Amino acid sequence: MNLSNLLFGRPLRTSAERGEAIGPVAGIPIFGLDALSSAAYGPEAALTLLIPLGAMGLNYILPITAAIIILLIIVYFSYMQTIPAYPGGGGSYTVARENLGEKTGVLAAAALMVDYVLVVAVGISAGVGALVSAVPSLLPHTLALCLGILVIITMVNLRGVRETGAIFMLPTCLFVGTLTIAIVIGLVRTYLAHGHPVAVVAPLSLTATQNTVGTWILLQAFASGCTAMTGVEAVSNGVGAFREPRCKNAQTTLTIIIGILILLLAGIAYLAQVYHIGAADPNSPEYQSILSQLLTAITGRGVFYYTSIASILAVLALSANTAFADFPRLCQIVAQHKLLPSSFASRGRRLVFSQGIYVLAALSAILLIIFGGVTDKLIPLFAIGAFLAFTLSQAGMVVHWKKMGGEHAFHSMLINGLGTVVTFITVVIVLVAKFTDGAWITVILVPGLVVLMLMIHRHYMDIEKEISTDEPLHLEHMQPPLIIVPIKGWNKATKKALRFALDLSPAVKALYVEVNKGECSGLRARWKKLVTEPSERANYAPPELHVVYSAFRKVLTTILHVAQRESEKDPERQIVVVVPELVQNKWYNFFLHNQRASVLKARLYFLGNNHIVVVNVPWYLEEDHPHGPLFAEDTREEWIHES
């Protein structure tokens, strides 16, 4: 087994796509980790804004969480309707595009893409934050740990959807299981203590720096806490990954994810209040996350604590997998509409959209490096893209039900209409509350991405318009092309190129660019014996040796000028430049040659002359076989099988 097979698995046939489809249980770690893991950083993000209030701030975490849960339920019912209405996937983008217009769809796609990049960055940084809480000595290595985890998640996702679900199932179950057990123990102890439990290990003390509570600080806390809702749209975006019945399986997965998330959010918020656990300054050497403090307060720092922290770290870090599952699929759908490069629509060796995975990993790495892998610096950028996509999706569904009509259309419109209103209000709150903290970056990124996608779309449309035709093939006044073969002397590569050229046309011109006067005299003297006489004996028109002197040693420029001049002489005739090229079998020999043939081909292409055609004739060096391998091993086996 070669290294690529070991790292990424053996290539899968296109026909194996159905076998890669997943069920509702496997869908939880693939599409639900982002939503579930937000239970770890959503409440903390809200409590962080309440730090100035000290212990008094804990009185507001339950109302804030209740508002978030109500919003979550509204969005849940909305997406339960979106899944069967648009079973092809694409979520907010597809709904907005089909009901609100193409440009609105592009806006939804841009919002989702920005959100997914942030999902990766925030998830991984939050996971490393949990690790640093347990092992403070790792704090200086935060960024390195973030980037290392990003590489691992990228490689896992390149192995395919099914393997990803299987790998991530254990940490998901461990995360949900340990947190549920901790919440149950905490609730039981709270009940037995009549609402005033004693912590096994006392949490960090809360010091108030202000005594008044304003609406503004509560809105900011709510805006930060809304990050717990990111990832809810993931299932509707990835319906195509589920096996039949797709819609039912997707709805089951979404229901399980939302149910677990509500229980975790409510339990954490309540226990944080009764155990008097507030957020700590992430820059403090005594920093501990909310969950770390909660677990030590309920169970102490024993085996259960470290097992729970390990599961939290794993799930927070792996929550980026939701973006890796959805971002490439979204890019594939958008690319099919010619709004992104067409390469995003191509499947890789394991039937995943590899191009999207690579781009997502690169953008996330840049974001982590810029913000040093610190969650609090990334949180302000986080919720705007998600809630903007929510809003456009719900508004699109209102129009969808209006078009569809029917018995239940009005009821469905009410649900989606309510979702539109509340998510739009949330967008405004988050935008205003977090604008100066970094949300302005998202405000620039989303429109910028919209403009970029529209420019790509216009480029593809211009090309399509330019090359489209209904005219039949014209064969009148055909004449053989003029073949120009640039040569550097007489060798096997030159000989092969001339043989190929004579097969194409009787009009062949060998072009030698002389940079020192007289250097071609030896070849001139031998040309008749080497080329002219053998050509005549075989009844071919002998190729002409054309020598051009370049006083300033501009070999490639001279070749281009000759080709352009010949094209101008007879604009109706095709000019074919046959480029002999030595091809190295060993990569390290690449640097020993000037790669002039490759540069010549590129410059000929950039001439932009439709009457000049470039043909490459390679001569392979150090070949083990006379003609070289026709196929790689796996491809050859597949070709034989298909034949």
Image (cartoon, rainbow, N blue to C red):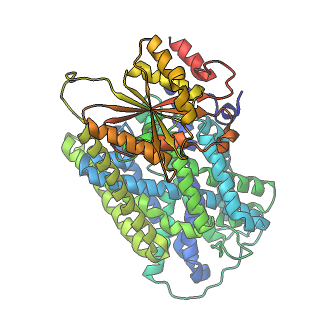
Q: Which image quarter holds the N terminus?
A: top right
Q: Nearer the viewer, residue 178 or 3?
A: 3
Q: Which residue lies furthest to the right in this view?
A: 302
Q: Identify the residue at image location x=50%, y=62%.
A: 227
Compared to residue 581, the image places residue 394 above or below, namely below
Q: Identify the residue at image location x=34%, y=63%.
A: 424
Quadrant of res 131: bottom right
User: x, y (%) of residue 343?
Assistant: 44, 40
Compared to residue 441, the image places residue 602 above or below, namely above
Q: Which of 497 and 130 is in front in this view?
A: 497
Evaluate whether residue 90 shows in this view: no
Tally of numbered tags: 0
User: x, y (%) of residue 592?
Assistant: 67, 43
Evaluate whether residue 577 shows in this view: yes
In the picture, measured across the screen, residue 107 lies left or right of residue 27, that is left
User: x, y (%) of residue 184?
Assistant: 65, 55
User: x, y (%) of residue 110?
Assistant: 39, 55
